[in-house]
Image (tube, rainbow, N blue to C red):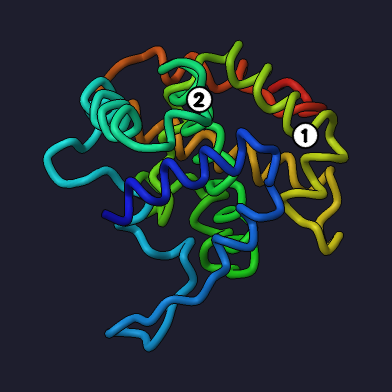
Amino acid sequence: MLYVANALGTAIAVNLKLTSLLDKWMHVRMPDRGEGERIWLQVRSAHYTPKGIGFKAEELFTFLKNVCSSTDAKSFFFSDEHLIQNVLLANLLCSLIELRHCNQDQACVDAIMKREEYFLFDVWPAWGLLTSGQFSTLTSEVFGDSTGVINFVFPDGTVALEKFWPLWKRWKEHCLNLWWQRSHDHRFLSKKPRMLLPGEPPND
């Protein structure tokens, strides 16, 4: 199952601090019947939960924990919470890579900046389940500071920080809005100003 391989594989990569490997993985080219080929980042079945689980977070993590407990993957995580945090952190990094690709398409950028109500993600933004405190701690451990953030998202140096932050804030808004639309839980809306990447200016 692609979702299990992707969720656990990327979580292990993040746990081992192999973020460059995760980036390369997302760019591996896969055969596709419709388009000839596509990169792994665009294989939605690898980034969305299996049919029947959907946005039910508790079922999602029970599913992954059960898989992990019966495989060698459990050797990489010292607790269920550790597994879940690494799955969500890896998901965030994949989401940021998707943002990089979106930035290469003006129509995609326009869709983000104009706050269109519906936005179809290749990577389901499961990271929205993190608390603002977890988000801050985990991203600080991975990136360190704003330089680490921009070097990961735009390693070629094509986008400066002052142009990245507005783009990221709209991306974050779309991701958290998606959770709010599905759950009608206002906690997702309240997270927006508090889920800050290292060095991210607070909302006005």
Where residue 192 appears, as percent x and y from the top left, is 55, 22
Q: Residue at x 50, y 25 (%)?
A: 77
Amino acid type at mark 1: Phe
Specify whether 158 is left or right of 120.
right
Q: Residue at x 54, y 48 (%)?
A: 94
Label 1 Cα crowd, 10 Å radius (few <14 / some 14-19 / many 20+): some
Marks 1 and 2, Cα distance to the nearest angstrom? 21 Å
Which disc, if any, is residue 77?
A: 2
SS category of the residue bearing label 1: helix
Where residue 116 appears, as percent x and y from the top left, is 42, 49
Specify whether 67 is left or right of 99.
left
* On-image quarter of the C terminus: top right
Amino acid type at mark 2: Phe
SS category of the residue bearing label 2: loop
Where residue 48 appears, as percent x and y from the top left, is 31, 47
Which is more toward the observer, 16 or 194? Answer: 16
Q: Tell me the residue that label 1 is attached to.
A: 143
Q: Earlier in the sequence, mark 1 or mark 2?
A: 2
- Outermost residue on the left side: it is 52
